[in-house]
Amino acid sequence: MPLLLFDLDNTLLPRDAAYLAWAQDFLDEHRLPTGDLSWFATIDGGGYVPRSTVLGAAKRRYGLDHSLDFLLAHYRRGVNSHIHCPASHIEALRSARAAGWTLGIVSNGGTGPQLEKIRRTGLEPLVDGWVISEEARCVKPDPKIFEIAAKRCGVPPVHDWTSHTWMVGDYGPADIAGAEVTGLRSVWLHHGRPWAEGGYRPTLSAAGLPEAVGLVLSSRNAPGSQVRQRPAGRGKLAVAASSLVPRAAVAEERFARGGGGAPPRRYAAVARLGGPADGKAG
């Protein structure tokens, strides 16, 4: 059964936009300079810097009397109030399911925040299962987390399951490297950035999620295809190399490093396990 897996933040959900909206609210609420939005964007590190670091730095920068726990709760409420799943992404997921694909989410991060995003944004009924690194006790790019995702989506990770599975994500060292070491095909969402990793490459590259899903649906291993083989050898590009270096991209640089449970109809509850969250901070 063909399986299509997705990263959550900045793939299915525009996480960075929600973060900047919260930061703007924070500045307005505390009557701080609007120009400091760029400071918040920089220290965020694309979501890979721990929230305790970001909020602790903000607390010291502005001399705030609030406790770190208070600021963290404020942050969670604010970000979640701005997070949403674009209509074009929902339509892409529905198109994939209508075409016969099983859908799943593979996310690095804390169980509570990531699970809340899945449920608040309406993704829960659109996918067959999900896995979050904290509760699974493994992190992308570990192949184990992709195998767990397959099981939770009802696709046994045995025999040639990898030949019928794709991973879509925006972060090379987690999403694309994870697909590579697991043996999956992949689509990298470049978001206007050049590809910066030298040891591996995605199978395909796309500007956004709808385009990525379209590429997968038109691939040669789509449901009902007579021929089931890779559109290109693993580790080789099935698109022109120039598509990985968008003309509008800024000077090449490496962006910050770092980086569920399952739907109630399949798993009654999600265990919240101890230990630090991995990957994006939410």
Image (cartoon, helix red, strand yellow):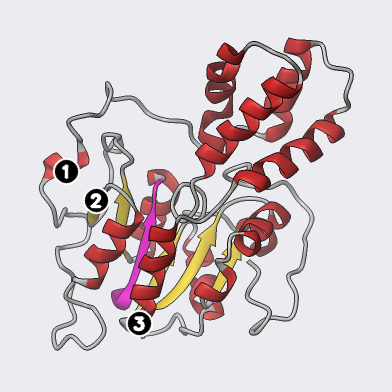
Question: In this rendering, is residue 5 above or below 53?
Answer: below
Spatial CA distance of label 1 from label 3 is: 28 Å
| Residues drawn in magenta | 163-170
Spatial CA distance of label 2 from label 1 is: 7 Å
Disc 2 residue crowd, few under 14, some 14–19, many 20+, Cα 10 Å: many
Q: Is mark 2 on a helix, strand or loop?
A: strand
For the N terminus, give its image quadrant: bottom left
Q: Are marks 2 and 1 in contact (CB under 8 Å)?
A: yes
Residue type at mark 2? Ser
Residue type at mark 3? Ala
Relative horizontal placement of residue 111, taking residue 244 as reference (left or right): right
Hey, which residue is sitting farthest left in the picture?
240
Disc 3 residue crowd, few under 14, some 14–19, many 20+, Cα 10 Å: few
**Residue 169: x and y, percent?**
40, 53
Q: Can residue 178 be seen in this view?
A: yes
Q: Is mark 1 on a helix, strand or loop?
A: helix
**Residue 172: x and y, percent?**
37, 45
Q: Main secondary structure of the magenta part?
A: strand
**Residue 19's quadrant in the figure?**
top right
| Residue picked out by circle 1 | 243
Q: Which mark is residue 205?
A: 2
Viewer-side label of 2, 3: 3
| Residue picked out by circle 3 | 98
Question: In this rendering, is residue 87 above or below 164?
Answer: above
Q: Which residue is drawn at 77% across and 13% down?
A: 60
The residue nearer to you, when weighing 148 against 29, is 29
Question: In this rendering, is residue 52 above or below 161?
Answer: above
**Residue 137's quadrant in the figure?**
bottom right
The residue nearer to you, when weighing 167 against 22, is 22
Looking at marks 2 and 3 on the same chain, the residue that comes earlier in the sequence is marked by 3
Relative horizontal placement of residue 184, taking residue 275 as reference (left or right): left
